[in-house]
Each structure stands twice: as structure tokens, then as C-alpha cells.
Image (cartoon, rainbow, N blue to C red):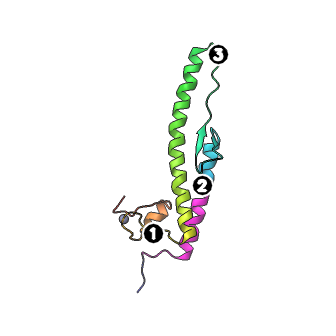
Amino acid sequence: MENNNKITPENLAEYKTQLQKKKARLEVQLSSFATKDPNLKDDWDTKYPRVPEGNLEEAADEVEEYSTKLHLEFSLENQLKDVNGALERIAKGKYGICENCGNPIAPERLEISPEARLCGKCK
Ligand SMILES: [Zn+2]
């Protein structure tokens, strides 16, 4: 009997391609305003604005922008960690297993978000 919940090697190759594309996209986004920390894996630091001296209004804008970027950095960084985690699981042959209950994650779910770490029930 055919098992529809099984990830085929073709599926896996497809998820891997998607994940690599996503990783590249996230890194491009991050590198537009942050620098990669050479010492910490998957850690990025938002460039601190050069605040023009004596211009308080502009300085306030810069600081506000910096705070927006920090939030964005946090969100992109988390996505990147998930993507990298999924790529590691593919490399280890442990891809598509829910981290919480150990059941397989439905391929339909992986198709939408190949970096998913939890099955539909545990999400
Ligand atoms: Zn689960």
C-alpha cells in the first residue's frame, strides 16, 4: 500500500532547493543592514547608525530606524536559523520528523514551509 505521508527523495530534493533559496534570500536581506558576526553562527548585528552631531531630529530618526531594523534582524535571524536547522536535518537524514512528538510532518505542510520543525498537531 502506498504511504502518502512518506517523503520521497524527489520531495526531499525539492525542499532542499527551496531551503537553499530561502537561505540565500534571507542572507541578502540581512546583509543589506546588518553584518554577519564572524564568531557566532547565524548571528547578525545591525549596523549602528552614524548619528550626525548636533542634529537631534535626525538623530532621533536614526535611532528609531535602528530599532525597526533590530526587530527585523531578530525575525530574519530566526527564520534563517529554522532554515539552517532544516538543512542540517536533511544532511543527517532526520528531516521531516516533528521535534515534539517524533511523528512525521505531513508533506503538504513541508511544501508550504519546508523549514517546519513541528507537525500540524504540535504547532
Ligand atoms: Zn508533533
The amino acid type found where label 1 is placed reads: Pro
Residue labelled with disc 3: 53
Q: Nearer the viewer, mark 1 or mark 3?
A: 3
**Marked residue nearer the N-terminal end (3 or 2):** 2
Q: Is residue 105 above or below residue 21?
A: below
Q: Is residue 20 magenta?
A: yes
Q: Residue furthest bottom?
A: 1
C-alpha distance separating marks 3 and 2:
38 Å
Residue with the mark numbered 1: 107
Chain-order first, disc 1 or disc 3 = 3
Q: Which residues are magenta?
A: 5-21
User: Image quadrant of residue 13?
Assistant: bottom right
Residue 55, image x and y in percent?
A: 61, 14
x, y percent for residue 121? 33, 63
Question: As drawn, which residue projects farthest toward the front?
Answer: 39
Can you say which quadrant of the picture contains the C terminus?
bottom left
Asked if the stretch drawn in magenta spans residue 115, the answer is no
Comparing 4 with 74, the one in front is 74
Q: Residue at x 62, y 28 (%)?
A: 49
